[in-house]
Amino acid sequence: MSIAISATASARKPWLTALVTSVLFLIVCLSWGTTWLGIKIAVETVPPLTAAGLRFLIAFPLFLGFALIRREPLLFPKESRWFFVFVTLSYFSLPYYLLNYGEMHVSSGLTALLFSCMPVFILLFSALFLREKIYPSQVLGIAIGFGSLFMIIRSQGLHLDHAELFGVLAILCAAVMHALCYVVTKKHGTSISVITYNTLPIGIAGVMLFVAGLQVEAPLFSAISARSWSALLYLGLVASVGGFIVYFLLLKRLSPIILSFVFIIFPVFAVIIGAWYEGQPLSQELMMYSAILLTGFAITKLPMEKWLRARTGP
C-alpha cells in the first residue's frame, strides 16, 4: 500500500522524484567514495584480515534486522547453495581482505582508481560467460583507461617495490573477483533478493575473516586506536549497510547503465578526500590522467555502435 501511494505521489511530482533520486545517487557516491579512506584509517592499527572481519560483524546485525523486518529468507534456494558459497568467498571474504591488504601499501585515492577498473572486467566476463558482444569503441575505452592508469602509477612516483607491487595486484585481484561475482550473479542470482544476497554471506564472511585474523595475525586489541574503531564502525554501518541499501533502491529508479556510472564518479570523491587526509597535493598531472582514465572506462559503458545501429535500423 505504501509503495503504491509513494509511486502515485512521485508521478504527481516528477521534480520531487528527480530530486530524491539525485540525492540518493550523491549519497552512494559519497559513501563509496569515502570507503577507501575508511579502510586506510582502519588498517592503521588493525591487521587486514581482522579489519575485514570486524567490518562485516558490525554490519551483520543490521542486515539481519532488515531481513527479519521484511520477512526475507536468510537461506539461498536449495539449487543455489553452491552460489551462496561462491558469493561468500568471492564477493565478501577474499576481495575485502585483499583491499585491506592493498591499502596498507597504496594510497586510498589510488586504490579507488585501481578498483574503478572493475566495470572493464565486468565487460570482459560478460563477453566470456554471457556471450555479450564487445564493440570497438569499448575496446578503445579499455585501452585509454589502462594506458592512463599506467601513467597515474608512474606520476605518483610508485617504484613498485615488492610491497607496493603486491598492494596494487591485491586491489586489482579484488576488482576482478567482484566483477566475476557480478556477472555470475546476473546469470544465476537475479531471483534472490538483495537482503538475502547480503545477510548470511556477510555474517559468515565476517566470522571466517575474524577467526582467521585471530589465528594468523594475533591482533592486540588494546593497541587499536579510537580512529580505527571509528573507521570500522563507519565501514560497517554506513558504507556496507547504507551504501548497499541506497544503491539497490536506485536500481529501481535508474537504468543499470546510468547507475553504473557510480563506479566512475566515486573514485573522484576518493581521490580528493584521500589527498586532503593524507596531505598530498592534487597535481595537474594526476587530475589529467584520472580524468582520462575515468573517461576511458565511461566509454566502455557506452557502446556507440549499438546505439547508432538502433537509431538507423538494420
Image (cartoon, rainbow, N blue to C red):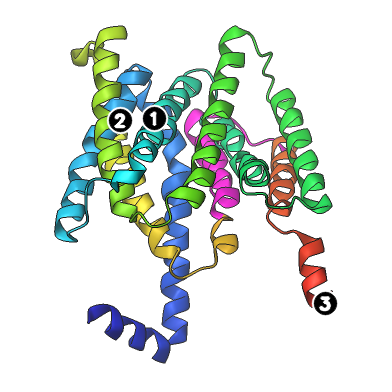
Inter-mark Cα distance, 3 to 2? 49 Å
| 240 left or right, relative to 122 | left
Inter-mark Cα distance, 2 to 1? 7 Å
The residue that appears at 55% across and 34% down in the rendered structure is: 175
User: Could you say whether the residue bearing mark 2 is in a helix, strand or loop?
Assistant: helix
Q: Which mark is residue 89?
A: 1
| 87 left or right, relative to 222 | right
Q: Position of residue 163 (x, y in %)?
A: 56, 10
Q: Are marks 2 and 1 in contact (CB under 8 Å)?
A: yes
Q: Position of residue 221 (x, y in %)?
A: 20, 15
Quadrant hosting residue 88: top left
Q: Which residues are magenta?
A: 262-284
Q: Are marks 1 and 3 in contact (CB under 8 Å)?
A: no
| 262 left or right, relative to 96 | right
> Is 67 placed above or below 35 here?
below
Dot 3: within a 10 Å radius of its alpha carbon, few (fewer than 14), some, or many (20 or more) residues?
few
Q: The N terminus appears in which quarter of the rendering? A: bottom left
Q: Amino acid at mark 1?
A: Leu
Residue identified by numbered label 3: 313
> Is 32 placed above or below 192 here?
above
